[in-house]
Structure formats: C-alpha cells, structure tokens
Image (cartoon, rainbow, N blue to C red):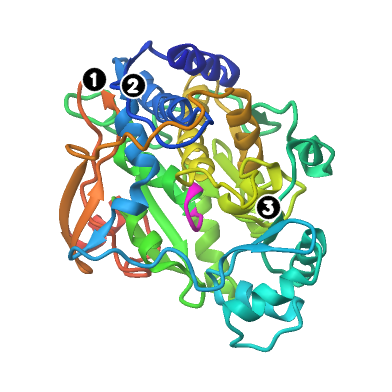
Amino acid sequence: MTAKLIRELGTSAGVTLPEVRVTDDGSRLPSAYRVEVAAAVSVGAATAAAAAVLGTEAEVSVREALVAFRDERYFRIDGEQGELWAELSGDYRTADGWVRLHCNFDHHRDAALRALGLSMGSDREAVRRACASRTALEVERRVTERNGCAAALRTPQEWREDPRARTVAGTPLVEVTRVPGGGGSPHGWPLGGGRAGREGGRALDGVRVLDLTRVIAGPVATRTMAAYGADVLKVGAPDLPEVPGLVISTAFGKRSCHLDLRSSEGRRVLADLVGSADVVVRAVRPGALGIVDELAERTQGLVSVDITAYGPTGGRGFDSLVQMATGIAGGDPPRPLPAQVLDHATGYLAAFGAIAALLRRRAEGGSWRVRLSLARTAQWLDELGRGEPEPADRLEATGSLGEMDSDFGRLTYVLPPGRIGGRRPGWTSPPPRQGADLPVWRDNAQRASGVG
C-alpha cells in the first residue's frame, strides 16, 4: 500500500520516482487512524524524490518515520525537555461541546483573553469558566475575529459542510503547477550548478532554499531539504515570537538571519534573496508576506512552496486546531492524534513537492508553485481508512537518536529518516542561534570570510 501511494504522488506531481523499499517491524502509535501509513508515505515520498535526483534507490522504515513524527518529544538540550505548550493552550468544554485555544504565542493568548472578556493574566480556571458559558462556535468566532487562534470541535459531517472543507476537497494532496510566464528553457541542477550527482554528493547540494516558515510543518520541510544538502537560510525578525524548543529542534543544518521588512533596506535584501533562490518556502496565513508574491512573479525559475492551515482562502491555524475543526480529534473529551501528524506529514510532503518541482524545472524549465494545507492532509489521513481499533503505543526510538554539540548545549535529536542509495541523510551543522548569520547564501558567506 505504501509504495503504491508514493508512486501515485509522483504521478500526480508529474515525476517518475524510484521504487521505494518499505520495511515495517510492526511499530504503531495509539490511534485508529493509519498514522503509520501517513508517516511512511510522506517520508518515503520525500526520500524517493531525493533519490530520483541522484538516480539511485530509496528506502523508508515505518518505525523511523513514526519516530520522526514525534521528534519534538525526543528532543533534549543537556538532557532536559523544554515546554511545548503554554499554560492556556488546550481543550475547553463549552456549553455545547468543546473548543481548543492555541495560546503558545503571547499575542494569541492576549487575543483569546480579550475575546472571552477576561483580564490579562487570567489563569486557566478563568478561561475554563468563560468557555463553559458560551457555545464552541461562539468562542471560535470571537477569538478569530480578534486575530487569535481557536477551533471548535466539529463532527466530520459538520466539517464537510464548512466552506474551508469545500475549498480543499478534490484538490491534489500536493499541488504542483507551472507558473505562467516563468521562463521556458530547462534549468541546470540546480539553477547555478551544484555537486548533486557527483561522487559523494547529496541530492540538493547547491540548491538555495529561503525559509520563511514558523512552527512545525514548514520548518520540517526545510530541515528535510537541509538534510539532503540544500543551503537553507531561515529569515526571521527579533520581535517575532517563537516556541524556543521547536525553533531549535527544526533548525538543524540551517543558517538564520534577521530582516526588518518594515525598512527599505530589509525589503531590498529580501528581494535579492528571493531573486537568487531556487526554492522559497512559506508557511503563513493567506495574504501574509504578500511582498514575496510580488518578488516571486519577477523571478524566473523559482519554486514557490506555500503551506497553509485551511487552504488559500482559510485563516490562521495549527495542527491541533485543524484536528478539532476537521473532526479528526472527535470524542468527548477530544482525542487528538498521538503526534503532530498533520504538521509532520505536510512538512515531508512539502519537501517532496519542492524536489518534484525542481525535477520538473530541470526537465521543462519554468517557475513552479507547490501548494499544501494541513486541512487537505487531514482529509487524506481520513481517506487512508482505519487500522486496529486502538493499538498500543508500540514505538521504540533506539537507533534513531543522535547527539550533537551546539551553542545551546548538548542536543539529543531524531536522526533524519529514510535511506538514499543506502545512506541515511544527515545535517552537517547544529541549529544556529536565531539571527546569527548574515543574509547571504552560504557560498557568498564563505567567499566573504575567505573560506574555500
């Protein structure tokens, strides 16, 4: 089943993938959903696309893919695990059901408190009482109107009647389309040459990836591409809120710079980076970073990857909220998936889509757009059917963890899953401190510093 689904993804994206060898030792996570299939297919598709670049074989282990889907649970700094959820984030019973609030960022927390008529600094008990006196949809509406993040628990039927569901229904899981006017002649691999295909080379050696993402799905996509050899430059700003542990755990192999896009100089530098990139990955709400759309339209040969929560017309959201909105977490109380499955699956599928588009660019030329959404991934997970009613947590991480020194301390992390030509991908550098690097590509930085 897994190998067939990977082949179908390749066909949908317009590329031919090598046959993927799938190994399954029976590892499972406690969910009736086919999480193991979603993990193996998404990781396997990215692995196969990288293998296609090199003309070699691909392999994926179900166990390794499942461990990768839980990587934030295994991540440690000097043996300590950081907090993944803020105090007010979570599920709350309402007058007619359940609602989930996402309050990991202070501005989202403050928006939720204002929406509920609570004072800043209110505790979880106050939020519980405020939610209990309102309907789930009322809480969702009030919070989202104030630019916060919330999702009422819907039934699958209620979700199918939602306009956002109708938007993503019937669209490809990974949509790869050519951009009109994006140039006609085939490009080399990558745009400016590179070492892919040479002895010992990695699939994405020389490929420049501009990372404009936050939280899990987008950073997983770009981290995966870094493991395949890409030069990934993450762009952020010092005033952007982050979840520290997640930022570090998804930054292996990347470099990080800060830009002030409110300034003309910041916008000029961003334009230079977009104009010289092979791939730009965004994971923001629709309409955000519109300047990138304008720049991308002027950049021939660019692969633009867009990851959203609910599709191109939906609002902001996160994995746990999409699980509630789509009915994936259905139950009383809600029963979320045993990992951030939508985030991780979408991340690996985005890496697959980016590489598929690069393969299309190499063969056909042009600029390409890749679109994915957490909501479409949730629909796909549902379409995979059900497995065991509720299997035990049968997952062992032995052999899947590595250690690396960094500016933050000694890191314990999940190794990249999959095998390309019999070799496991890997990162050549630890996560950097945010904003530690210049806003230039690695080869330019090396020339400036005199490094060969």
Residue 148 percent across, percent down from the top left: 69, 68
Residue 274 appears in the figure: yes
Cα–Cα gap, marks 3 and 1: 39 Å
Is label 3 or label 1 in front?
1
Residue 122 percent across, percent down from the top left: 61, 85
Q: Which residue is drawn at 25% across and 41% down?
A: 415
Q: In the shown orientation, is residue 338 left or right of residue 170?
A: left
Q: In the shown orientation, is residue 97 left or right of residue 280?
A: right
Q: Give the range drawn in magenta.
A: 212-217
In-front residue for pair 436/399: 399
Residue 216 painted magenta:
yes
Q: Name the residue under label 2.
A: 51
Residue 417 percent across, percent down from the top left: 30, 34
- Amino acid carrying label 2: it is Ala
In-front residue for pair 23/203: 23
Q: Which residue is drawn at 50% across and 58% down?
A: 214
Q: Contact (CB < 8 A) between labels 1 and 2?
A: yes
The numbered mark, 3 or 2, whose residue comes first in the sequence reads 2
The numbered mark, 1 or 2, whose residue comes first in the sequence reads 2
- Amino acid carrying label 3: it is Glu
Q: Name the residue under label 1.
A: 421
Cα–Cα gap, marks 3 and 2: 33 Å
The numbered disc on residue 344 is: none
